[in-house]
Image (spheres, helix red, strand yellow):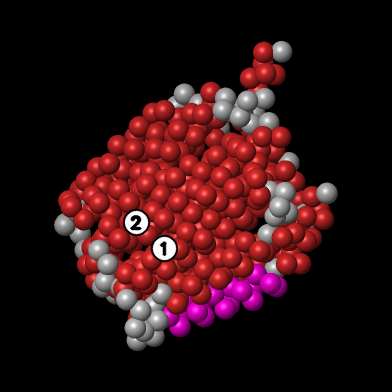
Amino acid sequence: MKQDSNSSKLFTRDFTLVVIGQVISLFGNAILRFALPLYLLRLTGSSTLFGTVTACSFIPMILLSLVGGVLADRINKRNIMVILDFCTAALITIFCLSMGKLPVVPLFIVFLMILYGISGTYQPAVQASVPALVRQEKLMEGNAVINFVNTLSGLTGPVIGGILFGIWGIYPILIISIACFTFSAIMEIFIVIPYQKRPAQKGLLSVAKSDLSESWRFTRDRKPAFFSVVAALAAFNLVLSPAMIVGIPVMVVNILGMDDFSLGLAQGVMGLGGLAGGLAAGPLASLIPVRRSYWLLLTCALSSVLMGAALLPGLPALAGYLIILAGSFTAMGASTLFTIQISTVVQQQTPAHLVGKIMAAIISVSMCTQPLGQAVYGLLFDLLSGVPFLVMFGAGAAALAISLYSKKAFIKLEDVSR
């Protein structure tokens, strides 16, 4: 009876350790991801270069998330988290020692590619551990907590990173990140995640091919609705997500001429929006069923149009900045609520031994268009520097069309879940 009582709680010992480890690790990641692109943007002033470097860094994350999905279903998830956090701390140390000794742009590209690649391998292990540590009826809450931690780090990381970067530059941020990843790895050693070793009588590549083939057959034969949703997300990630990732730093720093703290605050407000979306996931789950998920995408699209309005000629910089804050808060809130909802549906409809691979495949395929979009938007902000509002208006219009077109995909997904 005692075991059943403990298992009915959301915050069991091991799930709590996963959450705390995520808080520390993601905070170190957040200040790093804020400071490094800002350092490069300040150094070069080129939106094209900024977009290209950001695009290059995302490619290994997308590719390695598939590998992470296979590993998450084959290897103890705790070990994946520990090893990758230690590796990240070592990588940042090497980068810190290389600053000033190697060419800046190639160094940043290689470092960010490896950093994002590690992140892509790491996250499927976290996502696949949630169904293993919480009961089925607590799954929505568990996913909401993980997203809450992610967005809380996105809220505090850029704000603190902006303050540190503005006062002392890049080195204190690197040192804090090293400490965060090291401490997180040590804590994760004590996590116990239920794990049953699966026999692997083939080489690693053969195992990966076999596992991914099994995931493909499951999706094709039993959950074809997943394909329609992934296609809609891939299109959305081509036209809107890159506009936000590349556009917000460019709009705040290059176009509006704001300082580092203002950019950190803008990205912190995005985190606050994600926090609000995570908190709203439970109460709004019944009000916004899966078939209405496209409403959340429509909200993100309209937020892009609002941010474009912030760049209209004659509007004071401060007024434009406040509009960007409002748009980024709204977009991130809707996006987080959407992510929690879709992740929960997929986890509920997928067998335990396939969860890691299916989640990783959905993430990687839906994000595969994002690097192209980032490179294109960096170029567009340079080419249309006289009328930058057209870039965000265009992104918003395209995202609106995709959101409306995706309506049928989410209806199919809800019908399958019944």
Q: Quadrant of residue 138?
A: top right
What amino acid type is highlighted by mark number 1?
Leu
The residue lying at 42 percent from left, 68 percent from top is 323
- Residue 415: say if magenta: no
Is residue 223 shown above or below 85?
below
- Secondary structure state at the residue bearing disc 1: helix
Residue 390 magenta: yes
Residue 214 appears anywhere in the view? no
Residue 13 at x, y percent in the picture = 53, 23
Q: Main secondary structure of the magenta part?
A: helix
Instruction: Residue 326 in the image: state x and y as whole percent.
Output: 45, 63
Q: Which residue is mark 2?
A: 265
Rendered view: 266 above or below 91: below
User: In screen coordinates, is 5 left or right of 27?
Assistant: right
Asked if residue 47 is positioned above or below residue 266 in the image, the reply reads: below
> Which residue is labeled 1 in the image?
325
Q: Position of residue 379 (x, y in %)?
A: 39, 79
Q: Residues within 10 Å of mark 1 (few under 14, many from 20)?
A: many
Q: Give the magenta range.
A: 389-405
Dot 2 lies on which element?
A: helix
Q: Alpha-carbon neighbours of circle 2 within 10 Å: few (<14), some, or many (≥20)? A: many
Horizontal and vertical percent position of residue 198: 65, 33
Res 396 label:
none
Dots 2, 1 in contact, CB < 8 A: yes
The earlier-in-sequence mark between 2 and 1 is 2
Report the Cα–Cα distance between label 2 and label 1: 9 Å
Instruction: Give the vertical position of 350 relative to 307 (above or below).
Output: above
Q: Amino acid at mark 2?
A: Leu
Q: Is residue 301 left or right of residue 33?
A: right
